[in-house]
Image (cartoon, helix red, strand yellow):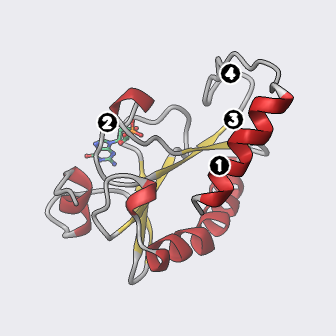
Amino acid sequence: MSDSIFSRIIRGEVPCHRVYEDELTIAFLDVNPVAPGHTLVVPKEPAVTLAELSDGSAAALGKVLPRICRAVCKATGATAYNILQNNGVAAHQVVEHVHFHVIPKTDSQGLGINWRPGPLNPEAGAELGRKIARLL
Ligand code: 5GP
């Protein structure tokens, strides 16, 4: 559990441009947007990473995310967007409170992705797939 800047926003101690709120979630504009309309969708539960989040908060987020994507696209005119969700400092998480970024994408603005995929080894993939499935 954390008491980050987002907990302070949820408690109303820090101002934000709120676009949505219900019992379990809140959404507001990012203070340093990558593109106009860059919105953060945040559970009120102060979990640090997605894996720590309760099923109830996860379901509430899953329900509201598509609605927020639709509204952000309509408001900005964007027809493409990325969802970004960072977990852990090594994965570029700065605020230690679960959040989803909704980032409109145009030719000139939005999320840049620079990943280096490689082919999946069939044997290693089968073994790892079974291992993950056993842990679910
Ligand atoms: P992260 O790297 O943790 O996934 O992203 C955290 C995001 O929170 C950043 O995009 C940053 O601009 C945003 N952020 C940090 N502090 C505040 C704040 O006080 N208000 C708002 N609206 N956004 C914030």
For label 2, the residue is: 94
Q: CA distance from mark 2 to mark 3?
A: 22 Å
Is 42 positioned to the left or the right of 110 in the image?
left
Q: Mark 3 vs ligand 1: CB under 8 Å?
A: no
Dot in front, 2 or 1: 1
For residue 30, above or below residue 124? below
For label 4, the residue is: 108
Residue 78's tag is none
Q: Mark 2 vs ligand 1: CB under 8 Å?
A: yes
Q: CA distance from mark 4 to mark 1?
A: 41 Å
Label 1 Cα crowd, 10 Å radius (few <14 / some 14-19 / many 20+):
few
Dot 2 or dot 4, earlier in sequence: 2
Q: CA distance from mark 1 to mark 3?
A: 36 Å
Quadrant of the rendering where the N terminus is positioned? bottom left
Q: Amino acid at mark 2?
A: Val
Instruction: Find numbered disc 3 in the image and state the secondary structure of the residue it sits on.
Output: loop
The answer to which of 68 and 58 lies nearer the viewer is 58
Residue at 37% over, 37% down:
93
The answer to which of 134 and 109 lies nearer the viewer is 134
Q: Amino acid at mark 1?
A: Lys
For residue 44, above or below residue 1? below
Q: CA distance from mark 2 to mark 4?
A: 25 Å
Dot in front, 2 or 4: 2
Residue 131's tag is 1
Label 3 Cα crowd, 10 Å radius (few <14 / some 14-19 / many 20+):
many
For label 3, the residue is: 105
Residue at 77% over, 18% down:
118
Give residue 16's position: percent from left, percent from top.
30, 56
